[in-house]
Image (cartoon, helix red, strand yellow):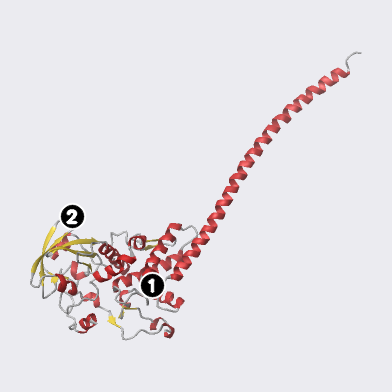
Amino acid sequence: MEIQQQVLQIKAPKPKRRVKIDENCDPLSKSAAFLRASKVQASLPPELPSFVKPMSPSHVSASFCLGLPKKFCDAHMPKQDETIVLVDEDGKEFNTKFLVEKTGLSSGWRAFSIGHKLREGDALVFQLIDSWKFKVYIVRVHSLNATVTVSRNQIEFGLRNSEIAEDMDIDSHQQNVQDKALVVLDQSGDGYADSDVLDGLRFSQSVLDFNDIQNIDDFSIVVDDLVVDSEIPKHFRIKYYELCHSQKSYLHENLLKGFNVKLAVGIILETVTIADAIKACKVDIARDDLATWDKTLKAFEDLGMKVGFLRARLCKLVGLLFELNELLEAKKNEQVKAEEEMRRVREVIKNLDVEIESLELKGKNLELAFCTEANAPW
């Protein structure tokens, strides 16, 4: 309700400045960067407050302003304008100005952004390590091993998206990630609030029962009472609808109440990506890739996603590969034994040829000796 009240109180949007958009920064890469940043945040000591901040155009060009989550500011930031120190991963410090009325950083942020070559889609983890001092961890949108790449035979995750499953300790960090990821939908109604965060997002009055959905035009993706269709590319939305339609239910409907919206969008995108990769895989795919997908889906399932049918398909594929590999290995062993037997037979034949040739020679000598003996004088 608090978020809803904030959204309802948002003033009419001011005309936006024209900023240069990174055309190469696709939503899937942004989601991968945010997932990695959330994983980094979950690994930090819980006693030190932190939050994740995805970079939008206004943060890295033009006005160079950085709005901070209002809830975080109310709980941990000074009540008057103050100098805030940002410490990068090399230990270098940057002084910035925190403006209480704007709940954001002004002077000094531009130097930090340019100095670290921040780009739209990068995700930053801010950890409050001392009074008015943040440790900043930067997750790059394009230099990750977290970029999702789909080929006909495999999918590589930047985490090599297996890191999502292996490193996300769902039981111990799930609530921590949600409590600390304060970037979503935190609006203050001023110029420093992220105008692009709520663009297209709206509260849902009701969720249509899936059995009442006739086609994709009736299909909306609602997470924690927010319609997130605008956050998902059209072709991903179509494929996600097909997956939901195959199961006659919203795959995400069991995600925990209050679940981080950006993280939920990333999970939906990854689910579609894995489903596509499963459809495209061939018999020569490495079993490690199948295991990686299953671990990732298992992590999503632990969070409430209905992906059991995808895991069941992977299980069947692994079973088929195991059966095929077992049979192939057995036949190869038979082939080795047969070749060994043939080698021994060839050796026996060779020895027999030598013996036969020797006996034939003896036969000729025997014929001569026999005739000599038969015609000898009495």
Q: Residue at x 51, y 61 (%)?
A: 319
Q: Looking at the rendering, in which quadrant would you find the C terminus?
A: top right
- Whether 300 is drawn above or below 90: the answer is below
Residue position marked by numbered label 1 in the rendering: 305
**Secondary-structure class at tag 1:** loop
Identified at 12% across, 74% down, the residue is: 102
Which residue position holds label 2? Answer: 90
Badge 2: few (under 14), some or many (20 or more) residues near its Cα, within 10 Å?
few
Q: Is residue 302 left or right of residue 43?
A: right
- Picture residue at 82% right of the left edge, 19% below the top: 369
Can you tell which mark lies on residue 7? none
Residue 69 quadrant: bottom left
Amino acid beneath label 1: Met
x, y (%) of residue 135? 18, 61
The residue sitting at the right extreme is 378
User: Dividing the picture into quarters, in which one does residue 68 lie?
Assistant: bottom left
The mark nearer the N terminus, 1 or 2, is 2
Q: Nearer the viewer, residue 180 or 346?
A: 180
Type of amino acid at the residue the image marks with label 2 = Asp
| Image quadrant containing the N terminus | bottom left
Which sits in the foreground, 204 or 47?
A: 47
